[in-house]
Amino acid sequence: MWNARGYYLMFLPVFIYVLIVYYWPMLGVRYAFYDYSIKNFEFIGLENFKSMFSTKDFWRAFSNTLQISVIKLLITTFTSVLVSVFLNEMGNMFAKKTLQTIIYLPHFMSWAVVAAIFTLFLSKSSSGFINETLKSWGVISKSIDFLHSKDWWRPIYYIINIWKETGWGTVIFLATLSGINPELYEAADIDGASRMQKIWNVTVPALANTVLIVLILNLAKVMNLFESVFVLYNTRVYKVADVISTYIYRESFMSAIPNYGYTTAVGLFKSVVGCILVLICNEASKRVRGRGII
Amino acid sequence: MANEKTAYKKPKKKIRVFDIVNYIVFIIVGLIVMIPIWKVVVDSFNAVGVYQFKFWPSQPTAAGYLTIFTTSKLYKPFLNSVITTIIGTLLGLVMSTLGGYVLCQEDMPGRELFSYFLLFTMIFSGGMIPEYLVMKQLGLVNSMWILVVKHGMNVYNLVLMRNFFEGIPSSLYEAARIDGCSPMGVFFRIVLPLSKAALASIGLMYAVTVWNDYSTVQIYITDRDQVNFQYMLRVMVMDGDTPTTAYKVSQSTLYYAAIVCAILPFMVLYPFLQKYFVKGVNVGAVKE
């Protein structure tokens, strides 16, 4: 132990930091069992959980979280795989590299920026890029208020996610594809396989394992959905867009008489579900690739 | 011979058609990504707001940018963003290199314990409200330093760093130790100089996270002197809440110029540092 004192000293700042920023808040989960508002602070047992489970808005937020996260994950993974497979077929290295540079770009924009861009583009006013363009093409006759419409909000949300994350999602798939043994393609050539046959029988199966890993890694995070929804939703689409984290935020910071006890309870529920998902996905990951995700 | 020739020609013809279709599809994909970005840039230099997509501004002006960098309520948030990003990145790098280095010392007693101590934070968290209450006690509510503290260390990045350090041949450590180098000496003289690529990748990850953070500011900060640029952009575009109305610039020009400023640092660095951005992902995910 004494010989390792140098290492302990180096670990000390990390230890203190993690203790304060990560572990101290964990003590705060006890507020979930309190009535904690500006005036009041008293132990009430499981009352917060009882009122949580009997609140319609909570269940709506919970089911929205699962639906939006999972559908978003499936769609963006699918588009990423599609783009990687065909990008892999590009012979011209310069074109391939240029395209990669372009499609990775949106990933580095913040959600605040992406929301600003698409709010301006989708606006109903006469300067709204999308509405006016569609009108001039004769696709629609009247402007649609996309982000304020219950029917349109989710499709638009998924499209924005595809635009932002598809490119970056290809990084991991392209890395896998570059590792495929070229002999497989040569063997397929000798068998007289066409280009599409080679894609379907060599490239796609090679990706299967990576796709599974990506899905597992991201399934562990489905409860974390927050900022992307937070910057795009509004009072008129709560029904289809409100998720757990935005619900906690509103109840704590936008409410006239916030009950921190109640919102901590909702947060604790979210953490516990998230924790279970991580452990399940960790187990799944161990089976698929021989090592966990944590 | 003749037979072989025809057999060789056939697949080649197929390849041509496929390639043309493939290139056309990818030109479209590239345009779908680039058109919104290009439109934002063009409109930020255009004095009038137009809905159409134009390759070049019809009435060129730099008024949007001039307004941002001469109005203190707009350039101060920008400076706040720059300061918090630089300090947050440095703190993040110090913490994750120290932690990553200690965690890869296999003969150190208590190594497992340290690992579990860190990994537990990836499984469970106190949640938004307990975190808020702790930060309030630390006096970080309504202060831009919350951005530095919240992102000052990311356990995932620390693990990436450890994975990278584990790739350094241990014979180098041994040799240095035999020469009488202390743990600290090995860290500064051997590990860090060999890890420039990892430092660049992980540093960029921290920088992007801090610069792009909007929700932390929305939750913790109400004082307009302390907000970052992402927040300012958001309140301008969404709430139409521009700091003053006495601008000699159209609203849309100002909005688009603000969007460009909010992405500018990384757009400028990105073409040069793309390989470091990509490396971070691959170190973490494809290490089989």
Image (cartoon, coloured by chain):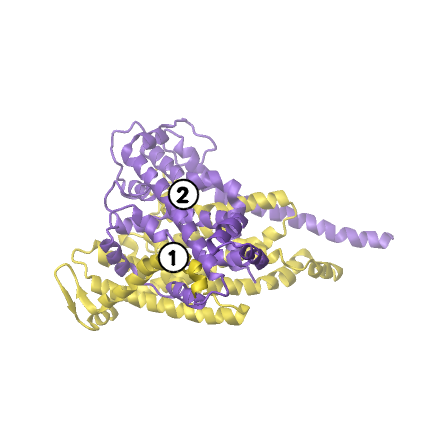
**Chain at tag 1:** A
Q: Is residue B246 left or right of residue A282?
A: left
Asked whether A110 or A44 is in front, the reply is: A44
Residue at mark 2 shares a chain with residue at mark 1: yes
Q: Which residue is mark 2?
A: A130
Name which residue type carries label 2: Ile
How many residues crowd around disc 1 within 10 Å: few (fewer than 14), some, or many (20 or more)? some
Residue A237: percent from left, percent from top: 30, 55
Q: Is residue A214 left or right of residue A181?
A: left
What mark, if any, has residue B282 been given in the picture?
none
Residue at 29% x, 66% y: name it.
Answer: A268
Three-letter residue code for mark 1? Val
Would you say residue A231 is visible in this rendering? no
Cβ–Cβ below 8 Å for labels 2 and 1? no
Residue B252, x across and y down, in percent: 34, 35
Q: Residue at x 43, y 35 (%)?
A: B41
Q: Is residue A174 left or right of residue B81?
A: right
Q: Secondary structure at mark 1?
A: helix
Label 2: how many residues lie within 10 Å, few (<14), some (14-19) or many (20+)?
A: many
Q: Position of residue B186 (x, y in %)?
A: 51, 53
User: On what subunit does the disc labeled 2 rest?
Assistant: A
The yellow-coloured chain is labelled: A
Q: Give the colour of chain B.
A: purple
Q: Which residue is mark 1?
A: A14
